[in-house]
Image: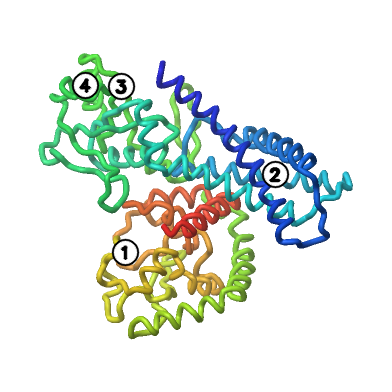
Amino acid sequence: MMKRTVYRLIFLVYPLVDFAILVFAIMFSYKLYWIMDIGKHVYYQNVQIVPISLIFASITVIIMQIFKVYKNESSLLNMEEIKNVVKGISLSFLLLGVILVFGQINISRYVLLFSYIFSLTFVVAEKMVFYHISPFSKFLKGFQKKVLIYGAGELGRALFREIANSPKLRINPIGFIDDDPNKRNYVCYQSGFNSTDCIRVLGNREDIERLKKVYDFDEIYVAISNINNDKLIEILDYLKAKNVKASFVPNLYKVFMHKVRIDKVGEIPVVKEEEDFEPFYLSFKRYLDIILAVIALILLWPVFLIIALAIKLDSKGPAIFIHDRVGKGGIIFKLFKFRTMYNGTNPYTVNPTDQNDSRITRVGRFLRKTSLDEIPQVINVLKGEMSFVGPRPEMPFIVEQYKEIHKERLKVVPGITGLWQLSIHENMDYDLYYKKNVSFFLDVAILIETLIFAFKGI
């Protein structure tokens, strides 16, 4: 009861924080406009700008509520919430623009533009802070439902990663139990690299009573790959006899990587895979990519030259690094990046996971930290081999190991950035999620998050 009350209070705070940030963004935008002294010099008194900011922020929060931004559910990396933030704020400013035009209200277009940009950036950044900041996450864990995952196999690990990437679910996985003696003390990390975000196998079914006393967990999730019905029923009966609340995960998560719907034949659920057609947005997206690539090349060519010169002065070798990658339909293409490692380093070994890797040059460390090494990929976008947002452009030898489900990601053009940039992961759940949910607002949400990460030097 206490946990539920705390979480309800926390989720009441979200709209209040958004409201405060939106008010600040509008007033900050006006102040910036005033300092820059641009446009037609349409100035206002505080007695005018403050009420307008308060009213507009209130309307925007209401619209975001309609778009289910504050829904007490979660999605992969909270992308649905952030995507709905982009929708809500965009619609709110669109309505404001229409009101200003038809109402013939004298307000600077610069203030409107700045307010939109800063509102979008600040609110998305706030959502990222709530999602990523460790002290906040640790505080919430004290009020979350504690669960054990029965099964440290593929399905159990996938469940752990989904829970770890979905903080709004209010679930804290404290460890695995597994009857396989070879998995004793096995550790599963949230990401593909060693980190503190991990859980381990704490024992087997015989240890459940001991673990209940030690961890006081609330529930056990049974998530065992390829388990037959008899075995599953036996485990559920065993847990019931021990007075342990239990749920089980059907081994269908790979099926739901496709677009499916659930119908009923009488009272029997039937899962049907929907026809796999290319959304209209993907055709429209190509034109957006061309426009953005041309603009980027025009604006960034001085940066391009400065970085190339810095690389040449720092170490021997070409400034541009060319790498074979696999694109849409499995076609191999040449990916361009600024060289960040010493010339002669094997390009097909394991990528560096630490900035102190001896293979990385001094300039390379800066480029990797700021993601500036990705700039030449704008050329790949212009050629149609890549998009600004999409799945990770993977190396050929990795694609050769793909299972059938993994080949789904090859149906979409790879991107300079994507969900995989926001949280390096040991599997392709993110790319498959993107392929299934690709949309304009998802792309905008990913681009904003990527820019915020790059600004922070992550």
Nearest to viewer (mark 4 / mark 1): 1
C-alpha distance separating marks 3 and 4: 9 Å
Residue 63 in the image: state x and y as whole percent: 67, 36
C-alpha distance separating marks 1 and 3: 40 Å
Taking the spot 61% from the left edge, 55% from the top edge, the residue there is 281
Q: Amino acid at mark 4?
A: Lys
Look at the picture and state if 216 lies above or below 21.
above
Residue of label 1: 355
Residue 448 in the image: state x and y as whole percent: 55, 54
Name the disc covering residue 448, or none: none
Q: Amino acid at mark 2?
A: Leu
Q: Write down the quadrant of residue 253 in the picture.
A: top left
C-alpha distance separating marks 2 and 1: 41 Å
Residue 256 in the image: state x and y as whole percent: 43, 41
Task: Return the disc, 4 or 1, that comes first in the chain's sequence.
Answer: 4
Discs 2, 1 touching: Cβ within 8 Å = no
C-alpha distance separating marks 3 and 2: 42 Å
Discs 3, 2 touching: Cβ within 8 Å = no
Residue 345 in the image: state x and y as whole percent: 27, 77
Residue of label 3: 218
Q: Secondary structure at mark 4?
A: helix
Name the disc covering residue 91, or none: 2
- The one nearer the camera, 427 or 69, is 69
Q: In the image, 102: left or right of 232?
A: right
Nearest to viewer (mark 2 / mark 1): 1
Q: Write down the quadrant of residue 295 in the picture.
A: bottom right
